[in-house]
Image: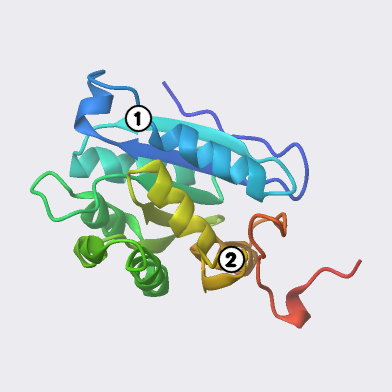
């Protein structure tokens, strides 16, 4: 059965693919928490509500790669976020599967994610999350690996704040809207109370 492309309901609407990667959740052994956590955070962070295409799959390299390709090439997603499968265990193959279908690596995202996580746990250095751009002839998308736990997902996307609510380490999502601008996607705006997206002055939309 062919994948159905998403259709924007607004010019600024992001089309987002969410992939939860877990053997146990995919086999129904427990309820997936990754996709609901991602949706909850993005719904609060984005001014224009996104459209989602969601997938729950097992830790299989070929299946992960194929699912990313499907969401970018056929569904037309601007942003694909994966959750799970980024540690050092034998079954953790998400980074390899992501790199296999990327056309440009985006190493800064992984570096920043580990920097954020190190504020909370020393085992952040075991995380292998990566990000890539996937390009086709007429479309491009940003693909980012995220942690598996809802708390870690929110921390990674939103960053580290002090007791007064001031940002200590920016979350990775601060860079996502401008990256999507640069690859030809929609102009996504964020709610400042959740995260402030950064764009250089020359790239900001005139009010």
- Mark nearer the viewer, 2 or 1: 2
Name the N-terminal-most of marks 2 and 1: 1
Residue indicated by mark 1: 56
Q: Is residue 173 left or right of residue 108?
A: right
Labelled disc at residue 186: none
Instruction: Determine which quarter of the picture holds residue 144.
Output: bottom left
Residue at x 30%, y 54% (from the top left corner): 98
Q: In the image, residue 33 lies at what x, y percent?
A: 39, 32
Q: Is residue 6 left or right of residue 187?
A: left
Residue at x 22%, y 19% (from the top left corner): 29
Q: Is residue 115 above or below residue 191?
A: below
Residue at x 67%, y 65% (from the top left corner): 196
Instruction: Determine which quarter of the picture holds residue 129.
Output: bottom left
Q: Is residue 184 left or right of residue 104?
A: right
Quarter of the figure with the N terminus: top left
Q: Nearer the viewer, residue 90 or 73?
A: 90
Q: In the image, residue 36 lies at what x, y percent?
A: 48, 32
Residue lying furthest top in this view? Answer: 28
Judge the density around disc 2: few (<14), some (14-19), many (≥20) Cα neighbours within 10 Å. Answer: some
Residue indicated by mark 2: 174
How far is disc 2 from disc 1 in space, using C-alphas?
26 Å
Residue at x 48%, y 50% (from the top left corner): 154
Can residue 142 be seen at all in this image of the molecule? no
Q: Is residue 144 above or below residue 64?
A: below
């Amino acid at each position: 059965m062919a994948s159905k492309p998403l259709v924007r309901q607004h010019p600024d609407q992001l089309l987002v693919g969410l992939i939860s990667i877990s053997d146990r959740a995919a086999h129904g052994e427990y309820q997936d928490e990754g996709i609901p956590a991602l949706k909850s955070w993005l719904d609060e962070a984005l001014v224009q509500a996104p459209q989602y295409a969601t997938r729950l799959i097992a830790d299989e390299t070929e299946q992960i790669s194929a699912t990313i390709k499907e969401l970018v090439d056929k569904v037309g997603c601007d942003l694909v976020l994966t959750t799970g499968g980024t540690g050092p265990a034998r079954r953790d193959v998400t980074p390899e599967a992501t790199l296999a279908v990327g056309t440009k690596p985006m190493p800064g995202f992984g570096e920043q994610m580990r920097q954020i996580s190190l504020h909370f746990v020393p085992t952040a250095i075991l995380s292998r999350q990566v990000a890539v751009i996937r390009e086709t002839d007429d479309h491009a998308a940003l693909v980012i690996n995220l942690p598996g736990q809802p708390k870690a997902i929110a921390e990674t996307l939103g960053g580290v704040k002090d007791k007064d609510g001031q940002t200590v380490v920016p979350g990775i999502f601060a860079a996502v809207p401008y990256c999507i601008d640069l690859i030809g996607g929609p102009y996504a705006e964020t709610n400042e109370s959740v995260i402030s997206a950064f764009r250089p002055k020359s790239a900001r939309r005139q009010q």
